[in-house]
Amino acid sequence: MEGVRRHGGRCESGGQLSHGLCGRNPRQGARCPHRPPRGQGGAPKRRRRRMSRVDVERQADDQYLIRGELTLATVPALERRALPAQWPAQATVRLDLSGVTRSDSAGLALLIEWLRVARSRNVRLRLAELPAQMREIARISDLLPILPLD
């Protein structure tokens, strides 16, 4: 079971290894060589995650510029904005993705959902400047042929 427990399973549950096994003098205050001395912090510090952000700028009645990250972290907020509801019926709408800095499969799934909604409303959706990362995901998933690329 080595490596399965928290912190790689290097210690017994609760850090109960005897000081003789750890090779440390109990007066030094350390329980095990890889742990800090008592009173000097215990658990490793977690890195603070940076906030992901995505913005949609309406450039014209039928053109939108998407900027930021189109990822699992940002897609739900973008989906709640109901962007397809703003598109005029029977129009051609162009999404410029040149401002997308990072994308993943959730971003691609959102674009496919928007494509489905657009078709149901007789809106012709065009995607411009699809990021390389998203293009590769679409290619691997055999979705590239269905994307209306400019």
Image (cartoon, grey):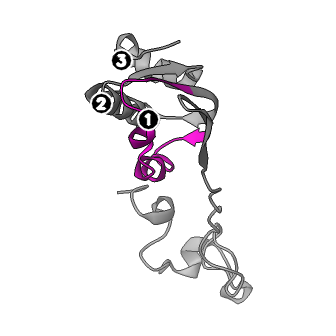
65 inside magenta stretch: no
- Closest to the camera, between mark 2 and mark 3, is 2
Task: Name the image quarter holding the N terminus.
Answer: bottom left
Report the number of numbered marks: 3
Image height of 3 relative to 67, above or below: below
Disc marking residue 148: none
Question: The residue under label 3 is which amino acid type?
Answer: Leu
Q: Residue 64 placed where, x, y %?
A: 57, 33
Alpha carbons under labels 2 and 3: distance apart: 21 Å
Q: Quadrant of residue 38?
A: bottom right
Image height of 126 relative to 117, above or below: above
Give the residue drawn at x 41%, y 53%.
80
83 inside magenta stretch: yes
Give the residue drawn at x 69%, y 75%.
36
Contact between marks 2 and 3 (CB within 8 A): the answer is no
Question: The residue under label 1 is which amino acid type?
Answer: Trp
Question: The residue under label 2 is which amino acid type?
Answer: Arg
Alpha carbons under labels 3 and 1: distance apart: 24 Å
Image height of 1 relative to 148, above or below: below
**Label 3 secondary element:** loop
Q: Is residue 82 left or right of residue 35?
A: left
Disc marking residue 87: 1
Q: How crowded is the residue under tag 1: few (<14 C-alpha within 10 Å), some, or many (20+)?
A: some
Residue for badge 3: 143
